[in-house]
């Protein structure tokens, strides 16, 4: 079959499942967020990240939820922890087991700003 084997508008070259035990920040004040960084070897800026906690976040994080997850630098996973309650999160949070799905676009070597902006 002549030509490339993936669609011109981009496919996925890597779809991997990783495990990590990550500890949330000790304190996030009421109605705010903070971003924590974690070293995960092999990540590249532009990787698409999905996070799946393996336990309930409520008892582990005391009011925190995940606002977003992204790769901020090579090998660095950044997680935005959000406290949308009227009480500050505090204490000594326990580590949370996560399954992390990493999807790496075919076009990643060209920079994510060069990804197509539509499917057609």
Image (tube, rainbow, N blue to C red):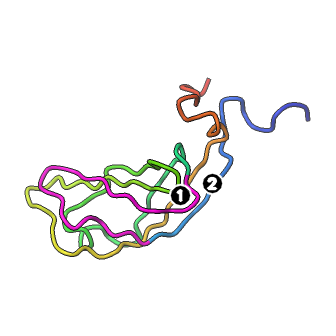
Q: Seen from this angle, which residue lies furthest left?
A: 86
Residue neighbourhood size for the residue with mark 1, other residues' Cα within 10 Å, grouped as few (<14), some (14–19), many (≥20): some
Which residue is rendered at x = 49% and y = 52% of the image?
A: 49
Q: Residue furthest front?
A: 74
In the image, residue 65 sits, relative to residue 113, either above or below, namely: below
59 versus 49 height, above or below? below
In x, y percent, where is residue 80? 32, 52
Residue linked to disc 2? 15
User: The residue tagged with tag 1: helix, strand or loop?
Assistant: strand
**Most extreme residue toward the right, as rendered?**
1
Depicted 32 relative to depicted 114: above or below: below
Question: In what quadrant of the picture does the N terminus appear?
Answer: top right
Q: Is residue 59 above or below residue 30?
A: below
| Disc 2 and disc 1 in contact, CB within 8 angstroms | yes
What distance separates the C-alpha of mark 2 from that of mark 1? Answer: 7 Å
Q: Residue furthest top?
A: 120
35 inside magenta stretch: yes
Q: What residue does disc 1 label?
A: 101
Residue 27, x across and y down, in percent:
18, 64
Which numbered dot is residue 68? none
**Mark 2 neighbour density, 10 Å: few (under 14) some (14–19) many (20 or more):** few
Question: Which stretch is magenta?
Answer: 21-43
Query: Which of the 4 quarters of the picture holds residue 63?
Result: bottom left
């Amino acid at each position: 079959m002549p030509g490339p084997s993936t669609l011109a508008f981009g496919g996925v070259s890597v779809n991997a499942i990783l495990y990590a035990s990550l500890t949330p920040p000790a304190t996030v004040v009421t109605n705010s967020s903070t971003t924590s960084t974690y070293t995960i070897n092999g990540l590249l800026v532009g990787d698409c990240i999905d996070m799946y906690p393996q336990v309930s976040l409520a008892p582990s994080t005391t009011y925190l939820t995940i606002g977003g997850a992204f790769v901020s630098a090579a090998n660095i996973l950044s997680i935005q922890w959000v406290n949308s309650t009227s009480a500050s999160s505090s204490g000594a949070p326990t580590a949370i087991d996560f399954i992390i799905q990493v999807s790496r676009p075919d076009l990643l070597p060209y920079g994510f700003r060069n990804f197509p902006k539509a499917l057609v």
